[in-house]
Image: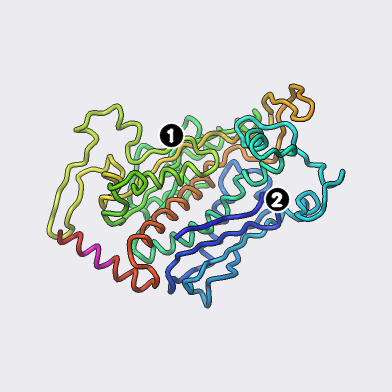
């Protein structure tokens, strides 16, 4: 299974294609739209989210709500394109009118300058339109499809916010997906401890007034993932490595940890390794989960734990120093419409890319032309593991 996305931030639409989904997979479009709405929500979001009301349209690979096995094609319309149609016109030549939103002052921390240097763009809008996190809306739609595939294989998955700025949102890290969903639904920050919401709201409000931005840490939990997904035989077959790459492929991510992650580096081996146990009912298991569900690049049957460190958004309303691309004068960086923090929607995005990678490895590991066949193979495999 693989996917491709296309489209610019203020272009007419985002487009996605998934190839390799099994035929016979039931797709609930409303669940995709709920995930898209969740991505647009969260405290600290900017004004664009009041314009866009993302809805997916599936234009290929689906009939009567069931996948056909052919490529699944999805689109999401950009409503804000109505205000940008001349500026983002794909056909008309440049004029004074349609270059009014030209970008000449690159933003520190964004792709603007380096992308312009690499692709020889003189108007940096050609860079920022695609490097914008707007593209992640389509990855959330694709991730929702993959999450529905996982759910129909009895695998649960959730992403939530562990830290915003310097405020750690919980010291309790449950691995029960249903429990986590219940807790994070009680606030607009996707945090476990609802009592911290008011303090975090104040932090975000104060940061916004200062013209600054905030990052944070995201945590994703996947439960009931069978052991043995991924492989130890080559570096590029290790599933934890693929998850790390997928997470780092999301805008503004600067670090990934599996399980205890960097904390494990400061602890003794006896404090990091997870003792093995066995019983007749459940088969093989571990007494702890410091390694986040992975050993040797393979799942070990424990819940998968992935953490992602997100830097603050680089668009600052009190702009930092930059240099004008045309005049070489020292000037303030360009300012685009942005958020104070996007850590809440980013938790949806990270959840989505983890779901995509798990769907990929499952469809690669098992015969997956048809959903009912895949379900039988997974059930047989789980039984085989239990009896080992």
Q: Which mark is residue 96?
A: none
- Let me know if residue 382 is in the magenta part: yes
- Is residue 315 shown above or below 179? above
**Rendered location of residue 51, percent (x, y):** 70, 52
Nearer to us in this view, 101 or 37: 101
Query: Which of the 4 quarters of the picture holds residue 81?
Result: bottom right
Residue placed at 78% from the left, 52% from the top? 83
Residue placed at 38% from the left, 38% from the top? 257
Nearer to us in this view, 127 or 299: 127
Q: In this figure, which residue is indicated by the disc labeled 2?
A: 10
Read off the magenta span.
Answer: 379-383
- Let me know if residue 171 is in the magenta part: no
**Rendered location of residue 7, percent (x, y):** 64, 54
Q: Secondary structure at mark 1?
A: strand
Query: Which of the 4 quarters of the picture holds residue 263?
Result: top left
Q: In this figure, which residue is indicated by the disc labeled 1?
A: 168
- Is residue 376 shown above or below 325? below
Magenta stretch prevailing secondary structure: helix
Q: Label 2 crowding class (10 Å Cα cut-off): few <14, some 14-19, many 20+?
A: many
Residue placed at 22% from the left, 38% from the top? 273
Quarter of the image with the C terminus in it: bottom left
């Amino acid at each position: 299974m693989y996917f491709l996305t296309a489209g610019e931030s203020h272009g007419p639409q985002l487009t996605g294609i998934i190839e390799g989904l099994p035929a016979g997979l039931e797709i609930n479009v409303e669940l995709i739209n709920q995930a898209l709405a969740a991505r647009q929500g969260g405290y600290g979001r900017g004004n664009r989210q009041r314009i866009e009301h993302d809805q997916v349209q599936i234009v290929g690979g689906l009939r009567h709500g069931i996948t056909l096995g052919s490529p699944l094609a999805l689109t999401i319309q950009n409503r804000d394109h109505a205000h940008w149609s001349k500026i983002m016109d794909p056909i008309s030549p440049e004029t004074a009118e349609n270059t009014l939103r030209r970008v000449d002052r690159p933003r520190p921390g964004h792709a603007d300058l380096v992308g312009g240097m690499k692709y020889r763009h003189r108007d940096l809008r050609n860079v920022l339109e695609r490097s914008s996190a707007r593209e992640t809306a389509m990855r959330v739609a694709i991730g929702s499809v993959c999450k529905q595939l996982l759910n129909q294989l009895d695998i649960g998955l959730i992403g939530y916010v562990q830290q915003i700025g310097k405020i750690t949102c919980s010291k309790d890290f449950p691995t029960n997906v249903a429990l986590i969903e219940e807790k994070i639904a009680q606030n607009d920050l996707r945090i476990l401890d609802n009592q911290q919401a008011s303090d975090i709201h104040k932090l975000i409000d104060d940061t916004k007034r200062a013209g600054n931005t905030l990052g944070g840490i995201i945590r994703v939990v996947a439960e009931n993932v069978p052991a043995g997904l991924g492989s130890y035989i080559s570096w590029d077959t290790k599933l934890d490595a693929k998850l790390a790459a997928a997470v780092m492929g999301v805008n503004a991510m600067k670090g990934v940890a599996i399980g205890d992650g960097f904390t494990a580096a400061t602890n003794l081996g006896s404090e990091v390794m997870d003792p093995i146990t066995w019983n007749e009912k459940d088969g093989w298991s571990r007494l702890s989960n410091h390694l986040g569900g992975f050993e040797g690049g393979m799942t070990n049957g424990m819940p998968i734990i992935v953490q992602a460190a997100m830097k603050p958004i680089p668009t600052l309303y009190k702009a930092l120093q930059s240099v004008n691309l045309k005049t070489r004068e020292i000037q303030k960086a360009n300012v685009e419409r942005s958020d104070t923090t996007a850590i809440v929607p980013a938790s949806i995005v990270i959840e989505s890319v983890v779901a995509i990678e798990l769907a990929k490895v499952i469809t690669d590991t098992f015969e997956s032309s048809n959903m009912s066949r895949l379900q039988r193979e997974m059930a047989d495999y789980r039984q085989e593991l239990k009896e080992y």
